[in-house]
Image: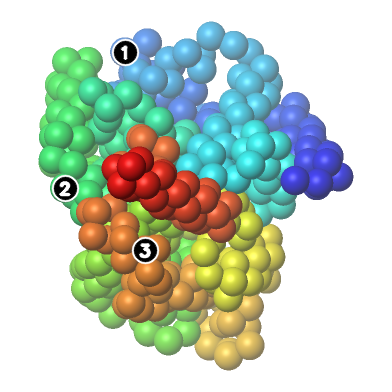
Amino acid sequence: MPVVFVLLGALIGAINLGHSFYLAANETLLDVGVFRDAGNALVNGDPLYDGFPTRSGFAFIYPPFAALLFVPLTWLPEVAMDIAWNTAIILAIFAVIGMACHRLGLERWWMWAIGLTGLSTLLDTVYMNLYYGQINVFLILLVAADVLGYTPKKIRGIGVGIAAGIKLTPAAYGVIFLVRKDWWSVARSAGFFALTALIGFALRPKESIYFWTEQFFATDRGGDVFYPPNQGVGGMLSRGLLSAGTVESLAPFILLTFALLSIFIAYRLEQRGRSVEALLVVVLGISLGAPIAVSHHWVGVILILPLIFAAREKNLRVLLAVAAGALISPSYTIIDESEAQVWAWPLWLNTNIIGLMGLTVFIAYLAVALQEPPHEERRSDAEGGADPGTGHGAAGPAAAEVDAEQARSGELDGRSHAQKGDR
């Protein structure tokens, strides 16, 4: 790990975090401002949905339980709150990347995490989370801690369950527990999710019923499908290829297709001990298959960064590096919403670069899943994969070297015992 890489990453991260502090001091971060309004509404007895006292004009689209978590945001002056929020985003990114680096077997994982966290602030998805003060990084932190084995085994599932209780989408990450046949973690995820719903019901019974019976099913609450930052497959199709109405009718098929493919790929990767890559595939499947997946929803793609250095296949590492470079570009900004359905081939490619690169990486992992695994991965298949919580089954070249060394060591030990037996 070159020290210059760590210093460069830290410098880039510090500059971009400083820029986010400037935004916090001079502009209200819109999304965290809505979260603060929700916390105030809960404390003051104001409505969370119909008649919600929003200062920005944006509605609150999360369940009542989430509003409870946002109450502490009301305890600080707004600028201090915005600065604290964006600082926490960077720390959460460091934690996610750090867990991935450690699980992948990268030596001095914490140094890798410092450098890659700084570089991650160049990605458009991270920048937009800082620009708006979004919550998605914290959700992927809860999920990653769970599925990569960093929550205690006795409560594993708590991260996915609580994240789903804040914003239902993370419930989809429960498929990773399913493909592992980790039934207790599946049950705990469902149990903790149910607990969040019960807490919300205890706080606001009528509004909880409204949210789970009406608001939850409003498919347009995240915006129009052809909104340019929507980089899911539905969004890409609606910008010139198909009408918005046609895409909306196809939405269940698109969602089901990516769900089934994600489950298959994750299963194959998990059987080979490649848990970080399985998580990345589900991140991509959710983002590509969702009706609305704007840039800041894609923040789980930060997992690409450590995999550039740790994925087993050289060609895959090259592709991930290219994808990371493409994910820097906010090219969807070159058209506005009124032009979103105007077809022009070069323009379509440019404005959908995030979605297209995500789709390319997803297809690459589908190809990996369909291939017959190498010898060392076949051994993992025969053993039924590896529990991420044990620290075994890492995906990277470094981990492969460790596995090979352990195998050689075991072979020598076996010979030694055999020789002693001969005596």
Separation (CA) of disc 3 from disc 2: 19 Å
Q: Is residue 347 shown above or below 165?
A: below
Separation (CA) of disc 1 from disc 2: 44 Å
Indicate the position of residue 52 as horizontal and vertical percent values.
37, 29
Residue carrying label 2: 181
At x 23%, y 54%, the residue is 384
Q: Secondary structure at mark 1?
A: loop
Residue carrying label 3: 377
Residue type at tag 3: Glu
Residue carrying label 1: 45
**Foreground of the two, 413 or 69:** 413
Q: Residues within 10 Å of mark 2 (few under 14, many from 20)?
A: few
Number of the front mark, 3 or 2 = 3
Quadrant housing residue 21: top right
At x 63%, y 57%, the residue is 309
Residue type at tag 1: Gly
Q: Earlier in the sequence, mark 3 or mark 2?
A: 2
Q: Earlier in the sequence, mark 3 or mark 1?
A: 1
